[in-house]
Amino acid sequence: MNKLELLQRFVADERLSGIASKLYPDETGKGDAMRIHLRGLVGSAASIIAAAFHQSVNRPFVFVLNDKEEAAYFQNDLQQFLEKKEVFFLTDSFKKPGHFDELNNSNILLRTEALNRLVNSPLKNELLVTYPEALMELVVSTQALKKSTILIKMNEKLDEDFIIEVLVSYGFNRVDFVYEPGQFAIRGGIIDIFSFGNELPYRIELFIDEVESIRMFDPLTQLSQKRISQVTIVPNVQKQFSGSDKISFFDFIPEESIIWFQDVTYTRERINSCFENAIALAANIKEKPEDENEEERELNSTPDELFCNAETVMRALDKFSTVEFGRQYFFKEDEWMLFDMEPQPSINKNFNLLIDHWRKYIANHCAILLFSDNVNQFRRLDSILEDLKANITYQPVNFAIKEGFFDKERKIACYTDHQLFDRYHRYHLKQGFSKSKSLSVKLLRELRPGDYVTHIDHGVGVFSGLEKIEVNGQLQEAVRMVYRDNDLLYVNIQSLHKISKYVGKDGTPPRINKLGTDAWEALKRKTKSKVKDIAKDLIELYAKRKATKGFAFSQDSYMQTELESSFIYEDTPDQMKSITDIKRDMEKDFPMDRLVCGDVGFGKTEVAVRAAFKAVADGKQVAVLVPTTILAIQHYKTFGERLSEFPCTVDYLNRFKSAKQQKETLQQLEEGKIDIIIGTSAIIGKKVKFKNLGLLIIDEEQKFGVAAKEKLRQLKANVDTLTLTATPIPRTLQFSLLGARDLSIINTPPPNRQPIETELVVFDPDKIKEAVDYEISRGGQVFFIHNRVKDIGEVAAMLKNICPETDITEAHGQLEGHVLEEKMIDFIERRYDVLVCTNIVESGLDIPNANTIIINDAQNFGLSDLHQLRGRVGRSNKKAFCYLVTPPVSTLTADARKRLKTIEEFADLGSGFQISMRDMDIRGAGNLLGGEQSGFIADIGYDTYHKILDEAIRELKQTDFKELFADEVKEEEKFVRDCTIDSDAEMLLPDSYVSNINERLALYTELDNIEGEEGLKSFDQKLRDRFGPIPKEVKELFDGVRLRKLAKQLGFERLQQRRGILKCYTVENPESSYYDSDTFARVMGFVLRHPQRCSIRQMEKNMLLTIQSVNTMHQAMEVMKLMLEESNLTQP
């Protein structure tokens, strides 16, 4: 039975169709409002009934659920049953429902989009789901919205000046590139607009004054995604329209709409309560000084101008038909319908009980349906039923609903996999626009005049912008760099890969180099020598590991599959890949050494649990090493809970245990009675003996001391090792390390996790009370971080004074072990509402119920520390909040302001990489290569360091470790790593094509780093999409990139193309194997075959080939191709 057949079972119900026929019998849509009660509905049955009604009644439906979460689940269920019909979701405009002091731009955008789609829909049977807080907000009138909406269609006339005038009058800002709502950009015949009524911005391409194409595009990449035939442009309804243009939602929707209520009484009371909150807030704003609460003042209206009260809502319902489908009813019914249903019974994973239930259903000729959006769960159940020898047939339905039910009349049992297996089911809502998504890494690394820049050949200088220069009468563009004593260097745009933004330690300014001296080369040689030593050690370890005979673990057992299926969340693709890589490593016969890198909250612990269980299943012991005692307890709880239903013993060892307890644990470990031991560096101490250690898991290795690291180094050579880290590792470094260490990156956040709402606030007792009260009111807990032990008691007392009804405890590292343990366990087990503590919670602590964190004196924390602390919340389905409490911003240092602004902007999960880039944080390199490298990075800059590291590793692979990397070396045999091109051809991005200097520089850099033809084609398409047809000068640029690739293949280090002559300089090292190679023979053969055009002469260190009649980049490229293609007929 598919979803359509299931729906038809309900549509065919004569009672349902009878009630449906009485709803507005006349086609005018007028008539008496009917009151309908649907009784006995349980689970997700209400959404199926609503879908069935919608098939029979061609009217708009509005569903009012009790809160945002209920509404979101209902909208998801309804959307599943009405697959082809969009179900709109009307959200409120604020960060917290019912708290009207902070607007949420993402919510405003989603709300405007829903209203805009409703008002412009040609259909008369739209569906919309909402909740009391969203329902009570006044909306812009239909007339005002229609009047302010611009409709742009394909092939219609559009005057550019007119659209600019209208957009400016609507409050849109003109920018170079559009990345957030309320912006527009114009480049040639391309207009980019980000409307408030659409989730993505639109690109309108004109041919003279006619709309040639309309495309949605991604603000992050600026690339088009999908073509459409028309678009509506809507202003910010929150700012654009005054109170006189605002009406009740019930005046906005058509009168023939049918309003469905989960609970009318609750809706009325909730609206009343929220309206009173709004009155209190308005009074509070009035009392505060003018310069405070700027965002609050945006409301700048009385509650009556923003919201309607419960009385107004109830009066408005007089003209609408209503359907009540909850447990209690408000209106006297005109019609009612009783359903004989039961909720899905709880079996608590007792599958024999499930089999009994299902056998009864089958005996009564009932259909059994199992709903799941994960095909693995069907396989899992099939496997269980097979093991229990239960010959039962059910019908899999490949989508998820919130709750199962049994309909006795229709003889249908609808079950959900997440209720059967106690898994977590999460609704999916549009997230709306997130500003942090628009801040790409490219933006973070953007060069501005005055920035420090490193040139690989000349050292550190100051970037002074792009400058037009004339070469033999042709216009070109070059990067201008200033060195010591105001020496100037112009860098050809063909050599941009040689320069990079200087990124050093803690933003300390570097030493500017002097042009024309050997100092820079000497520094590079010294760095390379040191880097080579480190790289050699890493590769030696790798080689030793590959040569060591280790234990090859068996393939997955049935229990391993069951453990993985029992994970209550969905695996992310990166998690799956990491787990697959780890298992493959464990099944090999040499020791594994894999590093798993993933941002906070990305599921690294689950990866570790699965690896540990795989080892235990093969009779091996596992040691889990963590940096703090708190984290040891956390992991002990996590591992214990995940493995509680499997034959596996988990214990921990840390200073919280008494000497007697520690001795008992050590003895059991030696006897093999403990399978998994978790602890701090004590577990790798001399006293610790394992019976059969097979896997070592290290959490945040960089946080251990030198002695512990040395001990680990010895252990790693013989035992499979898995290291977890939340420190972001930049991609450049990933490539360098791939030869020395196996690496898995978890970049994808868990599905539908919400960004953490991060706010910078000045210390205000009212604000703190409001944040704490709000979290506790929704059943959550709060972290209050205060990083000074000496006055932490006073802070806890102050909090108690502000929130007298709240249970508060305090914790810090100086407490006795057992006291700290008790406090943490009490907080985890919800005996306290607020934990006032130092940053001891920074590493890996996972308390899903704590979803608000207040960080006191946030200006004193480093950026990555703030990111780690913030990662303690937002680990469940609830919206999380992080408050950074500081003195007034004007009193902070520039660096502190920059740090706090960054953490506020990057609120999305997975923003750790961007944060480390903005912070110029080089710990990613230090962790893996050792802290002593920090000095070199400070001298030469991060990117240049990586280039030298890459070169060092490549050289080692080709010399000291040639045999180990034989395949790689053979593949990579190139005589020239780089080729410089000097030309008088007109090669540039004209100002008229790309007017923004920073964007031109970014595009030059991107183009200069492209290797293959596929990359060039993609770049060509990108330019056409964003800027229009490609000009001649840009085509020359493309040919320059192609030419450089061909020249490198032929062993040319430098090309000079001027006044119709092409000069090619070969490898500068006379000892190079290039001069004995087929490549050089090919070049010489070409010279001999074309004596009229070519000449070659010996220079001091290399050879110079001169070729006549080469006037363009394209002609130079054709000559190179000819050289490569012609068979080598004549040996020189």
Image: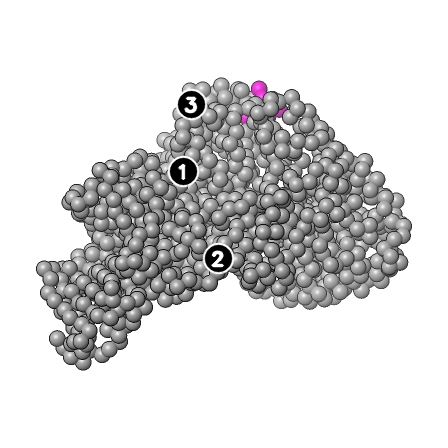
Q: Nearer the viewer, residue 115 or 482?
A: 482
Query: SS for tag 3?
Result: helix
Above/below status of 798 relative to 417: above
Give amino acid for label 1.
Ser
Query: Residue drawn at (50%, 41%), measured in percent from left and top?
Result: 907
Nearer to us of marks 3 and 2 is 2
Q: What label sits on residue 789 in the rendered view?
A: 3
Nearer to us of marks 2 and 1 is 2
Q: CA distance from mark 3 to mark 2?
A: 55 Å
Q: CA distance from mark 3 to mark 1?
A: 21 Å
Give amino acid for label 3.
Val
**Residue 653: percent from left, percent from top:** 38, 37
- Residue 772 inside the magenta-drawn segment: no
Q: Is residue 166 left or right of residue 685?
A: right
**Residue 585: percent from left, percent from top:** 35, 58
Q: Nearer the viewer, residue 352 or 939?
A: 939
Q: Is residue 116 left or right of residue 847?
A: right
Above/below status of 80 relative to 672: below
Circle 1 Cα neighbour tier, 10 Å, few/some/many (<14 / 14–19 / ≥20): many
- Quadrant placement of the N terminus: bottom right
Q: Are marks 3 and 2 in contact (CB under 8 Å)?
A: no
**Residue 774: percent from left, percent from top:** 62, 32
Query: Residue drawn at (46%, 35%), measured in percent from left and top?
Result: 901
Query: Residue drawn at (11%, 62%), measured in percent from left and top?
Result: 1099
- Does residue 468 appear anywhere in the picture? yes
Q: Quadrant of residue 1045?
A: bottom left
Magenta residues span 801-810
* Residue hosting label 1: 864
Counting residues from the start of the chain, the first of labels 2 and 1 encountered is: 1
Give amino acid for label 2.
Arg
* Residue hosting label 2: 1026
Q: What label sits on residue 703 in the rendered view?
A: none
